Amino acid sequence: MSGTFPGPAEPPERLVWTYAGFWWRVLAWLLDSVILALAGSLIGVLTGLRQVGIRFEPDSDPATAVSFAPALAQGVQFSMPNHLHVQNGGLSLVSLLLAIGYFVLLESSRWQATVGKRACRLRVTDLSGRRIGIGRALGRYGAKFVSAFVLCIGFLMVGWTRRSQGLHDLMADTLVMRLRPADAVFAFQPPPAR
């Protein structure tokens, strides 16, 4: 038996950047949500604070009753419409700052992606494909609240815009790109001239 090993059967695949589709972005968001939930829970355990949920309790009119069962906590409790009573609300601010730091710092880093985006081979860029700065990443994060404002239509726009941009991407002049094998990319072939 010889001491040499055969080389790879196929040459390494050639990769290209394309616009990231809606479902890849959803998968990345789910992964990031799990990471942030675990980090928030760990902070809650270490600090003794509880995660904030919301529970509406009507004063006397059952027609105004709306109930959101909080997943991890006692939650914010108040009676409609008379008063607001907050319990253990400290973690909501910590969770918000954690999420802002996570998205802004990672998307403006050399990775150009959060952990979830990186796992899905996604990258956030400016319109020229370059790395974005902290200011643009912060603006993009803030614009996500606008995307969520009306039934999350700003996020759904990823599915029908030419460059797969959500409203927050359009507002921040950013793109989300995905690394794919070149042979998997659909090349547009115009119909033959008649």
Image: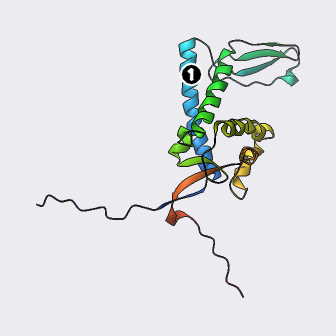
> Which is more toward the observer, 44 or 177?
177
Residue located beneath label 1 in the image: 41
Q: Is residue 194 above or below residue 169?
A: below
Q: Is residue 152 above or below residue 13?
A: above
Three-letter code, disc 1: Ser
Residue at 73% x, 35% y: name it. 142
Residue at 67% x, 52% y: name it. 127
Binning the other alpha carbons within 10 Å of mark 1 as few (below 14), some (14 to 19) or many (20 upward) gives: some
Residue 66: horizontal and vertical position, in percent? 80, 25
> Which is more toward the observer, 169 or 62?
169
Q: How many numbered callouts?
A: 1
- Quick one: quadrant of the N terminus? bottom left
Residue at 69% x, 23% y: name it. 69
Quarter where residue 101 is shown: top right
Left or right: residue 34 compared with residue 52: left
Residue 11: horizontal and vertical position, in percent? 37, 64
Residue 137: horizontal and vertical position, in percent? 66, 38
Q: Circle 1 — which element?
A: helix
